[in-house]
Image: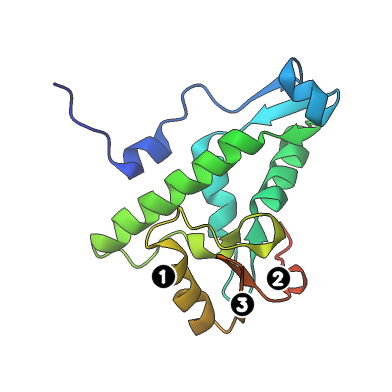
Amino acid sequence: MPRKKSWSEKLKDSKGLPKVEKIRGKMSARWGTGTVVIPAPMEVDEIMRKIPEGKLTTINEIRSALARKHRATIGCPMTTGIFAWVAANAAEEQRQKGDKNITPYWRTLKTGGVINEKYPGGAESQKKILEREGHKVIQKGKKYVVFNYEKLLAKI
């Protein structure tokens, strides 16, 4: 039975990505016409790594940066989100091995400034880290949101 890949190995496995394709099928109903970039996992991680303490980004900001980089109409929402999750788990895996220079995944939020509960440690853990970094986190229903996150977005 083959050994299960580590998160870091998954992050480095580009699977022939990035690639730019025409928007078609079900995607065109939501996103219209043009092209979509399907990024490589490391590209998503690279952008996430650039977010300095005190600043934030969202998956949509990352998608826009990837679209600009590849001259595509949009960045793929599905793969960008999945690769951010892989980057977060790889970072946590590295942290557990004693690495201090990890991707600050907790600074990458979902749409509307919502903390991603699927990242390592869940929303509670990220809330604590973000508060330590000086962010105000408020609860909206069952979700945690960074207050005024729009004013704290990094230029990427």
Q: Earlier in the sequence, mark 2 or mark 1?
A: 1
Horizontal side of residue 68 vs 7, given as left or right: right
Residue visible at 81% across and 24% down in the picture: 29
Q: Earlier in the sequence, mark 3 or mark 1?
A: 1
Q: CA distance from mark 3 to mark 1?
A: 14 Å
* Quadrant position of residue 26: top right
Camera-nearest residue between 110 and 63: 110
* Quadrant position of residue 138: bottom right
Mark 3 in CB contact with mark 1 (< 8 angstroms): no
Picture coordinates of residue 14, whole percent (x, y): 47, 29
Q: CA distance from mark 3 to mark 2?
A: 11 Å
Residue visible at 76% across and 20% down in the picture: 23
Label 1: how many Cα within 10 Å (few below 14, some 14–19, many 20+) = few
Q: Which residue is mark 1?
A: 125
Foreground tag (3 vs 2): 3
151 relative to 72, above or below: below
Q: CA distance from mark 2 to mark 1?
A: 18 Å
